[in-house]
Amino acid sequence: MGADICLAVHGGAGTIPASTLKGALAEAHHQSLRAALAAGFAVLQGGGSALDAVTAAVMRLEDDELFNAGRGAVFTSAGRLEMDAGIMEGAQRRAGAVAGVCGPKNPILAARAVMERSENVLLIGAGAEAFLREQNIPFEEPDYFTTQRRLDALQLELDRRASGAADTRSDADRHGTVGAVARDALGNLAAGTSTGGITAKRPGRVGDTPVVGAGVFADNGSCAVSTTGTGEVFIRFTAASEIAARVKYAGQSLERAAEDVVQELLAHGGDGGLIALGREGPPALPFNSSGMYRGFVTADGMIRTAIHRETWREICVEVNTT
Ligand code: ASP
């Protein structure tokens, strides 16, 4: 009892370049991150679990078409939507995930249903969708998830491939993800990650997001981690559990382990970043890309958000002291 509650979120490393992301558009991204943090913080403040806080925060980001998850997800090369999501709690290390699904309004709820209502950890495609319909998870038609911006990004990439031109797209046109990590008042940790993947990905391709130990991980004995970036490299280097292992067995600080792993991923072609939260202290939010939509809220109600390498924007939410 008596752990300091804390929540961190990310909206992916696929950021709009700093030269373009200004004014109202930048503010909209900060506002969305703040709304997700406030939603999760309200859960923690009310004595809710880290798992519920992560679910609430990720759902909020999935519902916002600014980010590549749920509504606003990117398309495969075949013009379809195949979403991945994973969730894990650190007390008993229960986990659930879905891959290649299109239908569940909030893929993170789908992952949670797999964790809580099936004997499995990872369900894919049509089989997953059938299970989730049985569970009465809210579904939406493909139109709900579809945005012009992501259709344009797909067309741009298909045209580029046809012409053989070099890939000069911005990170924002290539990929993105959302995620959250939380610590509740009981000291329990949880992590959740949700994505549409990479623009024009091969149908059937699954990234790191729903892979336990790569894109999502939680263990009360070490930390909770949610990642974003070049999924294949994050899988090969089991990015999330690598950080946990360094904290647990090598006695490294969370900050150091997270930063080192993110730099090592870059050396192998893995650009991106992650958010990590340990048994105590603030989160680590390192990235090796030009930016990562990110933010965190501490027990005192201070919400901090940032996108590129600028200083944090700070706003204090009301803290319930009763
Ligand atoms: N990691 C995600 C994937 O590979 C994409 C991203 O985070 O930008 O599917």
Image (cartoon, rainbow, N blue to C red):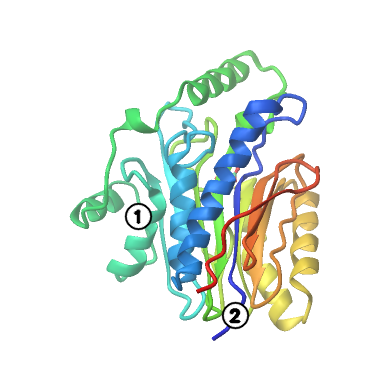
Task: Check residue 75 in the rendering and tell me which mark sits there, or answer none.
Answer: none
In which quadrant of the rendered image does the N terminus lie? bottom right
Please state the horizontal and vertical placement of residue 47, each as a whole percent of the image.
46, 73
Q: Which mark is residue 3?
A: 2
Closer to the N terminus: mark 1 or mark 2? Answer: 2
Which residue is pictured at 59% across the width and 56% down the height? 317
Place of residue 263 in the rendered image (x, y in percent of width and height, measured from the top left): 80, 55
Q: Is residue 208 visible?
A: no
Front one among 186 and 253: 186
What residue is rendered at 62% in x and 61% in y?
A: 301
* Residue 70 visible somewhere in the drawing: yes
* Location of mark 1 (residue): 110
Residue 170 drawn at (x, y percent) = 69, 28
User: Image quadrant of ligand 1?
Assistant: top right
Q: Amino acid at mark 1?
A: Ala
| 165 to 120, vertically: above or below | above
Q: Quadrant of residue 225?
A: bottom right
Q: Position of residue 84 (x, y in %)?
A: 45, 48
Q: Outermost residue, front direction?
A: 322
Image-based side of 253 in relation to 319, left or right: right
Q: Is mark 2 within 8 Å of ligand 1?
A: no
Q: Quadrant of residue 214?
A: bottom right
Task: Kindly identify the amino acid type of the residue bearing the numbered disc 2.
Answer: Ala
Residue neighbourhood size for the residue with mark 1, other residues' Cα within 10 Å, grouped as few (<14), some (14–19), many (≥20): many
Tally of numbered tags? 2
Q: Nearer the viewer, mark 1 or mark 2?
A: 2
Seen at 64% across and 45% down, the residue is 230
Residue at disc 2, secondary structure:
loop
Residues at marks 1 and 2 touching, judged by CB atoms closer than 8 Å: no
Ligand 1 within 8 Å of disc 1? The answer is: no
